[in-house]
Image (spheres, helix red, strand yellow):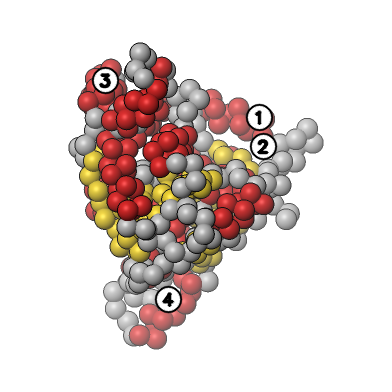
Amino acid sequence: MRHPFLIITTHTSLSRWEDEFSCCAPSINVVVYKGSEDVRSFIRTVEFHNEQGAIMFHVLISHCDTADQDIEIFKSISWEAIIIDTSQRSFAPRSLRHITVLSSNKKLLLLRQVEDRRSDYRKFLSLLDPDYEETNGDFPASSGSETEYMKLKERFTKFVAYECKTSAISKFIEYWVPVRLSDLQVEQYCACLLSNSHLLCSTLKSTDSFSTLHDILMATRKCCDHPYLVDWTLGRSIVKGLPVDAHLDVEIELSGKLQLLSRILIEVRKRGLRVLILFQALPASGQISVGDILDDFIHQKFGKDCLHAFVVNVSPPMRRSILNKFNSKESGKFVLLMETRACSPSTKLSDIDSVILFNSDWDPANDFRALQKVSIDSKFEHLSIFRLYSSCTIEEKILILAKRG
């Protein structure tokens, strides 16, 4: 590889790209280019060039807004290729117009299908093809013969590195399952919003305010899963003075999602079914994570022999061992707990009756993309996906906005 690759993606997908490289190609030197102007300056100083002035990284991952702000710096680098990840519908070609000044072998990475219209093909071609001009293109925008249209589509296809067909998710049937917050969750959620009310009501926009808003959103999302993720010290004070055998029930009552999940799993085991539970590993406060809470809850509630769990950093031999034991009909396991990032083509599951999404990605469609990586054998033609979300919260808003596109 003579020159580095540039990947332009969305804010929410920056960490996902980094995780994929870390898991699949750890030897590749990847730099995530984001943050305030000072942070980006520090990244350039430390990670861009060695003492001889040569580029040190193999892949640079950035957001289109960041690339726009530092376009002159990007122009000074010779790129092997520019990969544009269109994983969100709002990621329009016009927001990437500045990328056209960068000279490289551009490729478009599609994670959604482009609308089969001339106007969409023309917009993307004006971005990707230096020889194509949108205003004076070779083909009419809304008219012309079928032959001309097919040539336009063929020309566009040359710039597609990967396309996820919508039919790939037809085997899943999704159900949104609303959950009420517990009293403590409501208290935490409101406290988070009220303590930041000045910023939330402000019309001023700055890099620092955006960073703070992101922290607020993360705090509210963690609150929707379990109060311990916001304040892990609650685990000591809440159960203090209670008998040990009462601890589990108290901790379940603290989370609306755990209350519902407990009832679901009781019914699942009663019917002899098997489920896959997927969760997002949100950054947590202190030493506890969503995975820890779910693992501990299921083990204590249903016994240590009912569950297998693994996350993204499980070694390949351990992964194979876990999957073999879970897939064995004699094992008695009826729950597989899996971090969404751990989904991979090497994961093959048998006799899965349904999937439970304990929490969602910022872009809910990414949860389905993770599922598509896994080979799931089920006796049902369509696999039911139950997505838990806390009603009247940021989680519900994310789903509504995603549905609107």
- Neighbour class for label 2 at 10 Å: few (<14), some, many (≥20)? some
Quadrant containing the N terminus is bottom right
**Nearest to N terminus: mark 1 or mark 4:** 1
* Image height of 141 relative to 95, above or below: below
The type of residue carrying mark 4 is: Leu
User: Of discs 4 and 2, which sits in the foreground?
Assistant: 2
- Neighbour class for label 4 at 10 Å: few (<14), some, many (≥20)? some
Q: What residue is pinned by disc 4?
A: 152
The reply to whether discs 1 and 4 touch (Cβ–Cβ < 8 Å) is no
- Neighbour class for label 1 at 10 Å: few (<14), some, many (≥20)? few
User: Of discs 3 and 4, which sits in the foreground?
Assistant: 3
Count of labels in the image: 4
User: Of discs 1 and 3, which sits in the foreground?
Assistant: 3
Where disc 3 sits, the SS reads: helix
* Image height of 28 relative to 347, above or below: above
Q: Which residue is depicted at the point 24% across and 30% down? A: 182
Q: Whole-Å distance between the Cαs marked 2 and 1?
A: 6 Å
The type of residue carrying mark 2 is: Phe
Q: What residue is pinned by disc 3?
A: 191
